[in-house]
Image (spheres, rainbow, N blue to C red):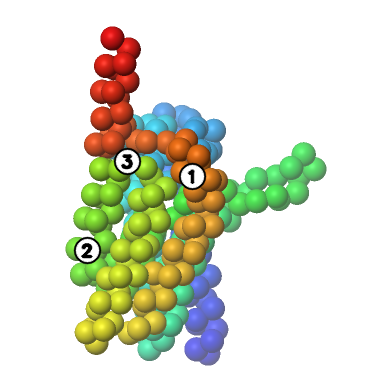
Amino acid sequence: MQIVLAILAVVLAYVIGSVPVGLLIVKIVTGKDIREVESGRTGGTNAMRAAGFWAGFATAMLDIVKGAAGVWVARWLTPDLPVVHMIAPLAAILGHNHSIFLPERDENGRIIRLRGGAGGAPSVGGAMGLYLPSILIVLPLGMLTFFSIGIASVTTMAVALYSTLAFAYYASQGIIPWAYVLYGVGAEILLVLALRPNIKRLFEGNERVVKYSLNGWLRKRKEEKAAK
């Protein structure tokens, strides 16, 4: 019975993660299909590009809740299995990145891939669900990275790194199970896989910089001075 409940918890976490919040918010606010805007991803950054700051902010917050909800469901169904609690938010990230509700088909109607986001916000939510005080480390550092560097892909990968380091510290103090550290490692792997095109652009120096950031503001000022 425990095995059945564990599988159910992981599947439910994946389905929760699959809910395309960004697509829904952008559609309601602007009528646009977020998959046809810029990167085509459904996360907060692309929602911001498609419908403005507040749409992006709302998308990010709700995507955080998706990651946390994966843990909450797992703890409800399998209260004594911390390994399942760790796996469930990874399933939510996977659902966010490859949503069962967003299949892309070829001209013959065959599914060629599942669309979604990059996983940054759900990974924050997963950390929050596993150990709430971790949000006091992960979220401020993530926001600092985003609003200073202004590169969403860097922020996304950094968030999982911050989670791993925070959980390693808490585990070393005996506060949380060491299994939770594997969550940060697993999340980092999922995020890097999702961001392979962005990583390529980073090395080429062509990655997008968000205008709502210090880096974006400095670049804009530099461009304005060069235009004078």
Does residue 110 appear anywhere in the picture? yes
Nearest to viewer (mark 3 / mark 1): 1
Residue holding disc 2: 137
Crowd tier of the residue under label 3, counting other residues whose Cα lies within 10 Å: few below 14, some 14–19, many 20 or above: many
Indicate the secondary structure of the residue bearing disc 2.
Answer: helix
Residue 212's spot in the image, x, y percent?
28, 34
Compared to 185, does 48 lie above or below? above
Residue 190's label in the rendered image is: none
Residue 183's spot in the image, x, y percent?
41, 72
The Cα atoms of the two marked residues, 3 and 1, are separated by 16 Å
Task: Using the rendered view, name the quadrant where residue 169 is placed.
Answer: bottom left
Q: Nearer the viewer, residue 188 or 95?
A: 188
Residue holding disc 1: 203
Hey, what amino acid is under mark 2?
A: Ile
Hey, what amino acid is under mark 1?
A: Phe
The Cα atoms of the two marked residues, 2 and 3, are separated by 19 Å
